[in-house]
Image (cartoon, helix red, strand yellow):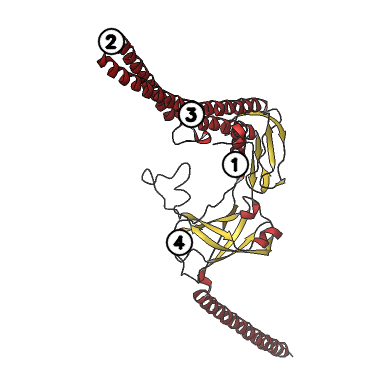
Amino acid sequence: MSSQPAVESSNSTTDKVAASTPRKSSRGLLLRLLGVVVVVAAIGWGFWYFLDGRWYASTDDAYVGGNVVQITPQIAGTVISIGADDGDLVKKGDVLVKLDQANADVALAEAKANLANTVRKVRGLYSNVSGARALVAARKVAVARARADYRRRVALAKSGAISAEELAHAADTLATAESALTTGQQQLETGKVLVDDTVVASHPDVQAAAARLRAAYLNDIRTTLLAPVSGYVAMRSVQLGQSVTPGSALMAVVPLQQVWVDANFKETQLTHMRIGQPVQIDSDVYGSAVTYKGEIASLGVGTGSAFSLLPAQNATGNWIKIVQRIPVRVVFTDPAQLQKHPLRIGMSLNVEVNLHDQSGPMLAQKPPSKPVLSTDVYRQQLAKADQLIEQTIHANMAGGKSR
């Protein structure tokens, strides 16, 4: 009776060992399969990185950059009107700020009157030349007559028909006529020097008065500050009644359709980077749902630390090597994307550069063929000033002619 429990205990131990054997074998199989999967994945990732993955460079140290066009007065004045506020859309030529122009109007009227007076004086110079020329002609006739009289009297004096005194009077008359002719010729030459090779409009005195009128007109029209470009107003600091001086920043206009990306890549990422390579751009504000298309416009000519306000002095003290970053300028190639999903200056971006095509240069090979930004707003102001000068000269000419 005592041997039966021992047999039963042995049988149960055998059953447990038999049950655990398949479980251990299945676990080992799973581990082996997992190892195979890891090895295959590693090999696949290696092939992908070698064939494609290593030809991309990305960074999240990228921000939206753009032109911030400062609106600054060119003359001193008092603000009487503000035409736009932060966030407002303005078009090129729109009025942003107006200054009190009372003093400028007075100066403009004075300069216009001065030009009119100068034109009339110069006209007098031309008239003096004409009069001097006629006077010289008359005195030449007088000299010829006096010379003829003197010659006749010389012949008569030889025959004793006239006295020596009368002959002396004839000689004096001839000398006086010749002296008057010389004086008239000198006056004619003096008058001609003042007007030679000119017309009224090109006379130096008229040109000087016209320049003063042009300056007064520009000062008058510059009391109205216009938007040099189309964009959105930012950083408005000007207030009504404020007395402003030339060069003080009143507000800024930012053309958001002309923004770019300043991406700061590590120097080790620039080995295969070239101008013109395609770029994919994601913004934090829109996420991965919106991907912008761009291309590299330029690679920076120095590190960020080299152009900082306080550049690093690596030749002094203890030195720790830090991988530097180079700013890379990326431009957007699809303006419609910016129109649909606008960006703001300073926004954070994620940039990925496709490095497959390395045919482009690392640095620009030729200078720009046209200005980066330009405006004709101020040129139009000068054209209007020239038009006012022409009208003033024309109105003060005899018969309305400038010649």
Q: In the image shown, does 278 or 63 lie closer to the viewer?
A: 278
Q: In the image shown, does 358 or 2 lie closer to the viewer?
A: 358
CB atoms at circles 1 and 4 under 8 Å apart?
Answer: no
269 vs 85, left or right, is left
Question: Label 3, on which residue?
Answer: 130
Label 1 or label 4, whichever lies nearer to me, is 1
Question: Label 1, on which residue?
Answer: 383
Rendered residue at 27%/12% (across/down): 160
| Residue type marked 1 | Ala
Q: Is residue 49 above or below residue 344?
A: below
Q: Which mark is residue 2?
A: none
Name the element at disc 3. helix
Can you give x and y, in whole percent of width and height, for residue 177 in the image?
Answer: 37, 19
Question: Label 4, on which residue?
Answer: 268
The Cα atoms of the two marked residues, 2 and 4, are separated by: 116 Å
The Cα atoms of the two marked residues, 3 and 1, are separated by: 35 Å
Can you give x and y, in whole percent of width and height, for residue 154 in the image?
Answer: 28, 18
Can you give x and y, in whole percent of width and height, for residue 296 in the image?
Answer: 53, 62
Report how many numbered discs are placed on residues in the image: 4
Graded by Cα atoms within 10 Å as few (under 14), some (14 to 19) or many (20 or more), the crowding at tag 3 reads: some
Graded by Cα atoms within 10 Å as few (under 14), some (14 to 19) or many (20 or more), the crowding at tag 4 reads: few
Q: In the image shown, does 325 or 188 lie closer to the viewer?
A: 188
Name the element at disc 4. helix
| Residue type marked 4 | Thr
The Cα atoms of the two marked residues, 1 and 4, are separated by: 54 Å
| Residue type marked 3 | Ser
Question: Label 2, on which residue?
Answer: 164
Label 2 or label 1, whichever lies nearer to me, is 2
The Cα atoms of the two marked residues, 2 and 3, are separated by: 40 Å
Q: Earlier in the sequence, mark 1 or mark 4?
A: 4
Q: Earlier in the sequence, mark 2 or mark 3?
A: 3
